[in-house]
């Protein structure tokens, strides 16, 4: 199992907080731990040690941070450059990672999400071709899902409160067997000018064709997507303290 962290974007909505630092290097608390550190520690605690990071904006800061803070584990990290980060969305970063993924199962994380590491385990153990991690509670400004039976049938930021089944937290697992079909969809998006889409467009296309998109739940475990200053304030008050104590206990 590999992990792919999509960290190429600039994060313009929270630029007033992080300045010239990549968003994933925003410090979470007084320990100087960053969003990226929380992700890496969570993956390592779940037994995922082969980690690819797609970089773009201020890429050298991310590479330097990882190689400095995880000096003893340098061999566990691969950096994939998205030189077109200013003109593309995460589907393009996803597409660039295909050679490194090499047909193996993997879990993909948006670089702006922090989470209790116990959230990962059910998704890593899922037998579904694709597994989205969802929160049963509504969160504003995030992608929602509609679930029917044991599968996600629709995903969008435009799903109404009256029809939503859960909030997608920005983490998705992919089995090895679905990669060929997945990247066929992504290749077509790139070829037809869809490099500014989210990779979830390809996942939706597969769901529409009958591929099972499963899901696991966060339950009552803490997580946050950090997109703007209010998200960061929420996370610092309600999420980071619980994550820090969890990682220390682990």
Image (tube, grey):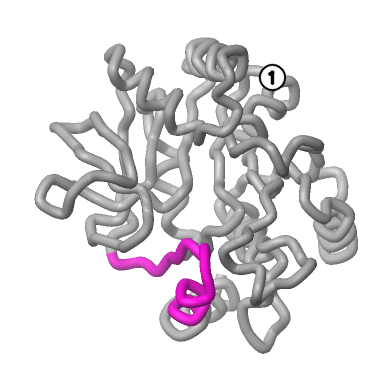
Q: Residues within 10 Å of mark 1 (few under 14, many from 20)?
A: few
Please tell me which residue lies in front, 189 or 125.
Answer: 189
* Residue 35 included in the magenta stretch of the image: no
Locate residue 204, reporting x and y percent: 36, 26
Viewport quadrant of the N terminus: top right
Please tell me which residue lies in front, 240 or 138.
Answer: 138
Task: Decide: is 216 above or below 175.
Answer: below
Locate residue 26, reporting x and y percent: 68, 71
In this image, 154 relative to 13: left or right? Answer: left
Secondary structure under badge 1? loop
| Residue occupying image coordinates x 31% and y 21% | 207
Question: Residue 145 occupies which quadrant of the picture?
Answer: top left
Task: Decide: is 21 above or below 58.
Answer: below
| Residue occupying image coordinates x 46% and y 49% | 170
The magenta region covers 220-235
Which residue ends up furthest to the bottom in the rendered image?
Answer: 30
Viewport quadrant of the C terminus: bottom right
Location of mark 1 (residue): 102
Tell me if I can see residue 102 in this picture.
yes
Locate residue 153, reporting x and y percent: 24, 29
């Amino acid at each position: 199992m590999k992990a792919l962290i999509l960290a190429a974007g600039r994060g313009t909505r929270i630029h007033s907080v992080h300045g010239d630092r990549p968003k994933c290097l925003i410090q979470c608390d007084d320990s100087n731990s960053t969003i990226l550190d929380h992700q890496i520690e969570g993956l390592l605690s779940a037994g995922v040690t082969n980690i690819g990071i797609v970089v773009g904006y201020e890429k050298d800061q991310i590479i330097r941070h990882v190689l400095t803070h995880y000096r003893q584990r340098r061999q566990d990290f691969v950096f994939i450059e998205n030189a077109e980060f200013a003109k593309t969305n995460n589907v393009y970063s996803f597409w660039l990672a295909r050679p490194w993924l090499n047909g193996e199962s993997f879990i993909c994380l948006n670089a702006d999400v922090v989470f209790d590491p116990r959230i990962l385990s059910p998704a890593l153990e899922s037998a579904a071709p694709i597994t989205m991690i969802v929160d049963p509670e509504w969160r504003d400004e995030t992608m929602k899902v509609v679930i029917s039976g044991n599968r996600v049938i629709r995903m969008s930021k435009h799903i109404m409160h009256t029809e939503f089944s859960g909030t997608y937290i920005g983490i998705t697992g992919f089995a090895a067997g679905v990669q060929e079909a997945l990247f066929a969809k992504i290749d077509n998006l790139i070829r037809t000018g869809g490099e500014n889409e989210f990779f979830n467009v390809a996942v939706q296309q597969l769901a529409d064709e009958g591929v099972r998109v499963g899901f696991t739940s966060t339950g009552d475990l803490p997580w946050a997507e950090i997109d703007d200053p209010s998200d960061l304030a929420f996370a610092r008050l309600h999420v980071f303290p619980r994550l820090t104590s969890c990682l220390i206990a682990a």
